[in-house]
Amino acid sequence: MKTVQSFINIKSYSKYQSILIIIILSLAQLMISLDFSIVNVALPSIQAQFHLTPTNLQWVVSAYALTFGSFLLLCGRASDIFNRKRIFLIGLIVFSTASLMGGLAQSPAIIFISRALQGLGAAMLAPTALSLITTTFPEGNQRNFALSIFTAMAAIGFTAGVTLGGILTQFLTWHWVFLINVPLCIFTFIIGILIIPNTIKNHLKASFDVTGAALIATTLLILIYAITQISTPGESIYEIIILFGICLVFAVSFLFVEHRADKPLVPFDIFRQRNIILSDVIMFLAFGAIAGFVFLITLLLQEGLGYSALQTGLIFIPAGIGAITGSILTPRILKRIDFSKIMLLGLIILCLGIIGIAKIGTFDSIIIFMIMYYFAFVGTSSVMISLNIAGTTGVEVRQQGLAAGLITTSQWIGGAIGVSMVSVVAALLSLSVGNNSLTRTEIYIHSMIVSIILVIIAILLALYLTLRRSSKKNENKLNFFNQYIKQ
């Protein structure tokens, strides 16, 4: 407890209240990432009960992705304009109600609707929770520590969801992958009412950009739908091209409206800060690589190597431990070196972990695989923490929700595209060489080249950011020295 308290020293709150704020907001982050991966393990059971075709089954995932990704930026900006605490609590109500609906579902239609509502609730929670962290804790060690815990929960939930999903599906029923969220939401809601500080309503409320909100939500909705269709078997390439064309029209319309709006939904002056743009792009690339990599690993273990859902979940445990390790080490290192250097180091570790797993080949030793997976998620945790810091540093309080929405949207869109890219590459490999020439295991391993390429590009951008920040710091030191000499 002394170690934790040493990072917290806020006049407005007691040390224990500050710690509870971190726990509550991090718990919401855990639920969102947990829900994303826990349902994937239960898909075969859902398919068997309702006799769903593969095309229909993918809507259990896609319905969530559509609403979550489409409303992230809108909800993030809404948290700047309205009461952040209220939006967070409403998000919990929507998320828990949808989870209860999914857990009690007796038809596929109810599951699809509940997943869409879960996505909407998660879109309200994710950027709002992040902006509550960045507005509650000032920049520096206090915020870095809070963001380390907050971000680590995403990586832990992402991997723990597979483990928990396997256990619940194996020993109970698939219904519990939904129902487990309900008590967590109720607990978070009650404590959140008591602990989370109230934020003053912004004067921009009266001039909320409704047109811009509708355009950006529609743009992202069509974009994510087009992305999910790319990896859908039998989908016409012409229909996908048309969808992207429509998306482009809405995107251009959004830019036109925002440029002319007096109080735009997305003030473009936020992009004058180079680290905001770079962190969003790196997040897009990094999480695209991570999501695609985890997707391939899940398929490789179950379909390629024949492990059960429970065994796959247990194999994922070292990844969760790696995420915890990264979250413990990162704030300590951040006290000594810049977050851009942590980001670069984490990306290199992640890249080496993916290459190491791809090099193992037939996985003669599952122990070696688990060790590689551990280090990959040590890097992942460090990257996510440093990116959340980079994407919110230097941003005014009135735009923290927007910054949180941008970094979270970049993460989600990148993840969706990453999964689609590896799916397409795996499908093309299957068609081009035939199952007799290349085993299913080898197809998944070769498809990891997509994740490796994405991480390498992210490394180059992180290197540029690191050099730029180092140069700027040296320039500031030189200016300070010159001023001191003149005095």
Image (tube, helix red, strand yellow):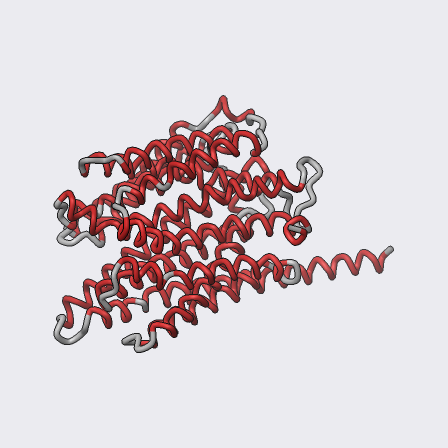
In the displayed structure image, the side of residue 291 where residue 387 appears, left or right: right
In the displayed structure image, the side of residue 305 where residue 201 appears, left or right: right
The x, y position of residue 322, in whole percent, is 47, 62
The x, y position of residue 417, in whole percent, is 32, 54
In the displayed structure image, the side of residue 397 where residue 434 appears, left or right: left
For the view shown, which residue lies furthest in the front direction?
Answer: 171
User: To which quarter of the image does residue 186 belong?
Assistant: top left
Q: Which residue is drawn at 60% across and 57% down?
A: 331
Name the residue nearer the viewer: 480 or 311: 311
Name the residue nearer the viewer: 229 or 115: 115
Q: Residue at x 50, y 45 (%)?
A: 26
Q: How many marks?
A: 0
User: To which quarter of the image does residue 421 belong?
Assistant: bottom left
Q: Is residue 87 above or below residue 135?
A: above
Q: Is residue 330 above or below residue 54?
A: below
Q: Is residue 144 above or below residue 451?
A: above
Quarter of the figure with the C terminus: bottom right
Let me know if residue 264 appears in the view: no
The x, y position of residue 59, in whole percent, is 22, 44
Let me know if residue 187 appears in the view: yes
For the view shown, which residue lies furthest in the right direction?
Answer: 487
Q: Which residue is drawn at 28% across and 67% down?
A: 447
Q: Residue at x 67, y 48 (%)?
A: 5
Name the residue nearer the viewer: 292 or 35: 35
The x, y position of residue 171, in whole percent, is 28, 51
Name the residue nearer the viewer: 146 or 460: 146
In the displayed structure image, the side of residue 113 where residue 13 appears, left or right: right
